[in-house]
Image: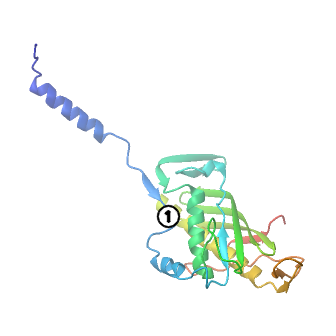
Amino acid sequence: MTFRRVPALATLGAVVMAAALAGCGSPASRFYTLSPTDDGARTTAAAAPSAGNAPWLIALAPVDVPPQVAKLQLVVQTDASQVRVLEQERWASLPGDEIRRALSGDLTQQLGTIDVYGSPHPEGVPVYRVSVNVQRFESWPGSHALIDAVWSVRALDTQTVLTCRTVLNEPVGDGYDALVVGHRRAVADLSQSIASGVRTLAAAPRVSTATSGAKSAAHAKPVARIACPQPVPAAAAPVQQPSQQPAGG
């Protein structure tokens, strides 16, 4: 068997080259979320209610977002007709999941209830199904973050439904952190509008009627039209208020 000596300088050169290539690798990705981890007060308050003592329950369905932004990478507008996909700037989960998680946390805190979507819940407690369709989710670095959403609240026992549209345009500063904060403010404002919608349906007069061979059930009195709630001013620094109108006109 023949052994061949490798010069020490050649070995050292290979090690240096490998280290240099490692240093020239792709930059590390940064991950963003719409549910801040420092919101401990909200988490504590939301964990307090139980299904047995909440006046009503909510069931927040998965949130729809436009296909062009339904990806982990941040998609930013460069002008009205062009976007840029940022490989190193990423959401912690898909934008629809991020929006749903943030909305669920906000709504449970504001309404003093829990989100039972996909979970069994006790009978006799009103449940309001919340659906959100984000039709525009635009990120303009150094300018604004825009969310245009059609949302509805349906009382599952009476099938009374309220459908509204909310458009939020939050000014932002430079940097992607500021852009994410702008979207977070928009989601918080959206949750206030939806919470008002749940309260509107919950306040609708209800009468108990009995049907033959069936249990007595609560039904809302017929309502010709339920107006969408007015925008609620944010408690934080003043920002542009959302425009809101019933869907379809």
Eyeballing the image, is 90 above or below 36? Answer: above
> On the rendered image, what quadrant is the C terminus found in?
bottom right
Q: Quadrant of residue 54?
A: bottom right
In the image, residue 111 sits, relative to residue 63, either above or below, namely below
Q: Residues within 10 Å of mark 1 (few under 14, many from 20)?
A: some
Q: Depth check: 211 or 107 in front?
A: 211
Determine whether the residue tagged by mark 1 lies in a helix, strand or loop: helix
Residue at 12 percent of width and 22 percent of height: 6
Q: From the top left corner, tell me how far across and down residue 183 is, in percent.
A: 57, 64
Instruction: Please tell me which residue is depicted at 64% across the width and 60% down the height of the picture.
Output: 62
> Hey, which residue is sitting farthest top in the picture?
1
Q: Nearer the viewer, residue 176 or 189?
A: 189
Q: Which three-letter amino acid code belongs to the residue tagged 1?
A: Ala
| Residue 180: image location, x then y, percent | 52, 62
What residue did someone put label 1 on?
A: 178
Q: Is residue 195 visible?
A: yes
- Left-right relation of 103 to 17: right
Q: Quadrant of the N terminus?
A: top left
Is 230 placed above or below 150 here? below
Q: Is residue 239 visible?
A: no
Please tell me which residue lies in front, 120 or 17.
Answer: 120
